[in-house]
Amino acid sequence: MAALAALFIFGCTLLQPPDRPAREVVLSENAPTPIGPYSQAIRVGNTVYCSGQIAIDPATGEQVRGNIEEETRLVLKNLRAVLNEAGMDSSHVVKATIFLANMDDYQPRDAGVEISCIAVKVD
């Protein structure tokens, strides 16, 4: 059985294209530590895929509950920290997705907000 597992693992590594860009985990001390089994962001070549951020204070690890403006400011600050760690900033963002906990919060009120983004840096 061990030989079969080793063959499977070896076979899988052979199937990967040799010119495949490496994946690099991006981890900023200035953004919240991930609360699940995921990374703050992954860099593949010149593209950075940021995980969704919610309003968590990086210093305390506590979720900040405020109005939509306060939560959004903190989420964007956290995303900027992750982008900066990857050598990018908000000008490199080509796509952002915003999730609200409740559509009634679409207009500024007490909202839960999550924002994720993809950034590309062209050398």
Image (cartoon, rainbow, N blue to C red):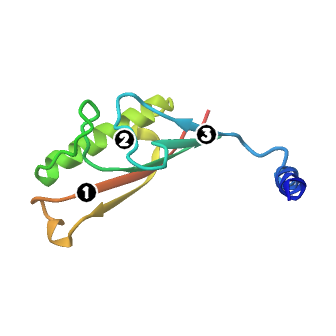
Which three-letter amino acid code belongs to the residue tagged 3?
Asn
**Residue type indicated by callout 2:** Leu
Residue 101 position in % (x across, y down): 24, 65
Q: Between residue 3 and residue 33, name the one nearer to us.
A: 3
Q: Are marks 1 and 2 in contact (CB under 8 Å)?
A: no
Choose top left, top right, bottom left or bottom right for residue 40. Answer: top left
Which quadrant is the N terminus positioned in? bottom right
Going by the image, does 106 lie left or right of 27? left
- Closer to the chain start, of discs 1 and 2, is 2
In the picture, measured across the screen, residue 106 lies left or right of residue 53, that is: left
Q: Earlier in the sequence, mark 1 or mark 3?
A: 3
Secondary structure under the numbered disc 3 in the rendered image: loop
Q: Name the residue under label 1.
A: 113
Residue corresponding to mark 3: 46
Structural crowding at the residue carrying mark 3, measured as other residues with C-alpha within 10 Å and reported as few (<14), some (14–19) or many (≥20): few
Position above or below: 84 against 67: above
Of tags 3 and 2, the one toward the viewer is: 2
Position of residue 104 measured from the top left corner of the image (x, y, whole percent)? 15, 71
Percent position of residue 79, x then y: 36, 41
Question: SS for tag 2?
Answer: helix
Whole-percent x and y of residue 21?
Answer: 72, 42
Gap in Å between the C-alphas at discs 1 and 2?
Answer: 13 Å
Q: Is mark 1 on a helix, strand or loop?
A: strand
Seen at 61% across and 39% down, the residue is 46
Q: What residue type is labelled 1?
A: Val
Neighbor class of circle 1 (other Cα within 10 Å; few <14, some 14-19, many 20+) is many
Residue for badge 2 = 79
Q: How far apart are marks 3 and 2 (CA)?
A: 17 Å
From what the image shows, is residue 28 above or below residue 76?
A: above
Side of 68 relative to 39 (left or right): left
